[in-house]
Amino acid sequence: MKSPLLVIPLVASISPWCLFAGSESGDRESADWAARVAYAENKRDANIREVRSIRRYVLHNARWKNDGTATVLVTSDVNGHKRYSFLDSHLEGIQKQILQRILDGEVETAVRKDEDPSISPRNYEMTPIGYETRNGRRCVIVDLKPRRRVKTLIEGRAWIDVNEAAPVRIEGRTAKSVSFWVGRPYIVLDFSKIGNYWLSAENRSSSDVKFLGKTELTIRYVDYAVTPKAGDVLMACRGKCSPGLIE
């Protein structure tokens, strides 16, 4: 019997510099916002050659004596290809299987065009429902309605920086069941601005996994190294940069 697979935090992890789109009145309003965000994303990311991130994974289930934890170096290039390596881990039994399958699934999904998670008119209808200041930034709140039922898209809401057309937070459930074991997990994705780029800061997902019960995954993005096509590497670290961040 295959072991249950916890949700892959698909949207943010597939593109660590992914951005968002917004709107202003019906279909045209939604398309206008989507176009604005897609344009801003493409413009900002045009100079990126590679992103390397140090991530801290924490798997939690009340049935386990200890949480499963791991520190992982993930490298993403501009073509969407990914690779990863473990820097340290404290995983027991099924915890190791779950995390290994999450990381392998992220690498495989990253190059599949049919799993494109980008915020664009092709993928989402977006309806503005209000404004709110979050993390000191003026945001428009939009309802997200996926145009395709795929597991890389989220049905829920997003908070978008109105000045930069960039996501500050996205939350909701996957548009399609991730698997028989997991169903449609609830996901919260937080982003922060580093230099000129918007990158994942923290991902949290919660699933009622068959035979395991409520299982939670948290990913914290500890350090970043952004290599542009031209110019100096941008380093963003919480304290001293982790070994292996720069080759």
Image: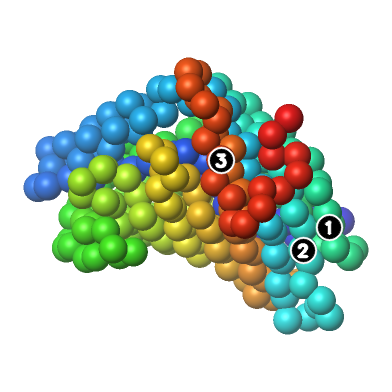
Q: In what element is the residue under mark 3?
A: strand
The residue nearer to you, when weighing 136 against 152, is 136
Question: Where residue 128 sits: x, y (%)?
Answer: 18, 55
Q: If you read the primary sequence from the N terminus, does the residue marked by circle 2 or circle 3 appear first?
A: 2
Query: Quarter holding the C terminus?
Result: top right
Q: Residue furthest right?
A: 93
Q: If you read the primary sequence from the N terminus, does the residue marked by circle 3 or circle 1 appear first?
A: 1
Judging by the rendered image, the residue that carries numbered circle 2 is 69
Query: Quarter holding the N terminus?
Result: bottom right
Residue at x 12%, y 47% (from the top left corner):
24
Question: Where residue 37 sits: x, y (%)?
Answer: 28, 37
The residue nearer to you, when weighing 214 against 222, is 222
Front: mark 3 or 1: 3
Q: Which mark is residue 201?
A: none
Is residue 183 in view from this perspective?
A: no
Quadrant position of residue 76 = top right
Q: Which mark is residue 235?
A: 3
Judging by the rendered image, the residue that carries numbered circle 1 is 89
What is the spatial separation of the Cα atoms under label 3 and label 1, in whole angstroms? 24 Å
The residue nearer to you, when weighing 157 against 4, is 157
Q: Are marks 2 and 1 in contact (CB under 8 Å)?
A: yes
What is the spatial separation of the Cα atoms under label 2 and label 3, in whole angstroms? 24 Å
